[in-house]
Image (spheres, rainbow, N blue to C red):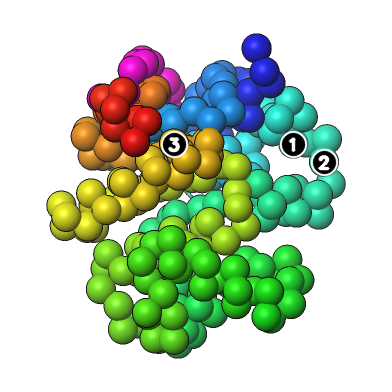
Amino acid sequence: MSTPVLETENLVKVYGRGESRFDALKGLTFEIGRGESVAIVGKSGSGKSTLMHLLALLDEPTAGVVALEGKPVTQLKPKEVSALRNKTFGFVFQQFFLNANQTVLENVTLPLKIAGVGKSERNRRGMEALERLDMADKAKNKATNLSGGQKQRVCIARALINDPSVLFADEPTGNLDSTTSEIVEEILFGLHRDHGITLVVVTHDDDLAAKCQRRLIMQDGQIVAEESGSSLTAEEAAR
Ligand SMILES: Nc1ncnc2c1ncn2[C@@H]1O[C@H](COP(=O)(O)OP(=O)(O)OP(=O)(O)O)[C@@H](O)[C@H]1O
Ligand SMILES: [Mg+2]
């Protein structure tokens, strides 16, 4: 078997201390294979976002290990971690707001700017990503003048700009109407299907979770069950 893209061993996250101590993750061990689609589901407060932040190397565990492509992250220097994160991961998080006063194109190309890519190359790749999401005509708009679904598509374009191998999405269809949700889902699973991207999705949406190949079910900081099998038909999966 090939090395899993992400592995955790006995992952623990404790918030606060003393009387306000809260055990958000209570020792999680699992793997995510390369090119897999995995949904993390469970009630509000069960620890889904906490787990996602640890997997995405945006936060550090209190104890336990996250390994990326077989390499424990603790063995890396902070600079190496941020370089790896920028190169390997894309994020579609609702709390990663767009900068309202910048244009759509500036928002989308921000990760490239951080990575030190020059302006003309940035804009070329930015337009390419916007075209993939049918948003090229809005490139020069201020991000504030967009509908909710359009903003979500800009977030996805920004997540794709570095050609990530793993895409993390926290409630990607959370505030969207059903038509826009379908478009976003189609984009996410299209990337999974056509580009072999690994999808890790936190969602309350049962239909979206069912489309993933695997579901990790969380309760009170633990994975209490796991399900396999996607509701996508073979035809949909291959389309
Ligand atoms: N910074 C923090 N300090 C203290 N407690 C926290 C902190 N962040 C999260 N928690 C607590 O940890 C638990 C898990 O939070 P988390 O955000 O992971 O839940 P979730 O499963 O994503 O919920 P939701 O579905 O509502 O987004 C919650 O009880 C929350 O109150
Ligand atoms: Mg959450």
Q: Position of residue 116 (x, y in %)?
A: 76, 71
Q: Nearer the viewer, residue 151 or 223?
A: 151
Does dot 1 land on a helix, a strand or a loop?
Answer: helix
Q: Mark 3 is on which residue type?
A: Arg
Q: Residue at x 29, y 32 (%)?
A: 236
Q: Mark 2 is on which residue type?
A: Leu
Q: Is mark 3 within 8 Å of ligand 2?
A: no
Q: Position of residue 135 (x, y in %)?
A: 37, 71
Q: Which label is found at residue 73?
A: 1
Quadrant where the C terminus lies? top left
Say if residue 99 shows up in the picture: no
Quadrant where the N terminus lies? top right
The residue indicated by pointer 2 is 76
Any magenta on residue 225? yes
Does dot 3 land on a helix, a strand or a loop?
Answer: helix
Q: Is residue 9 above or below residue 154?
A: above
Estimate the spatial distance between the alpha carbons at disc 1 and disc 3, rounded to whole Å: 28 Å
Q: Are marks 3 and 2 in contact (CB under 8 Å)?
A: no
Asked which quadrant contains residue 166, the reply is top right
Any magenta on residue 143? no
Q: Mark 1 or mark 3, which is nearer to you?
A: 3
Q: Work out whether mark 1 precedes mark 3 in sequence or the reverse, and give the earlier one.
A: 1
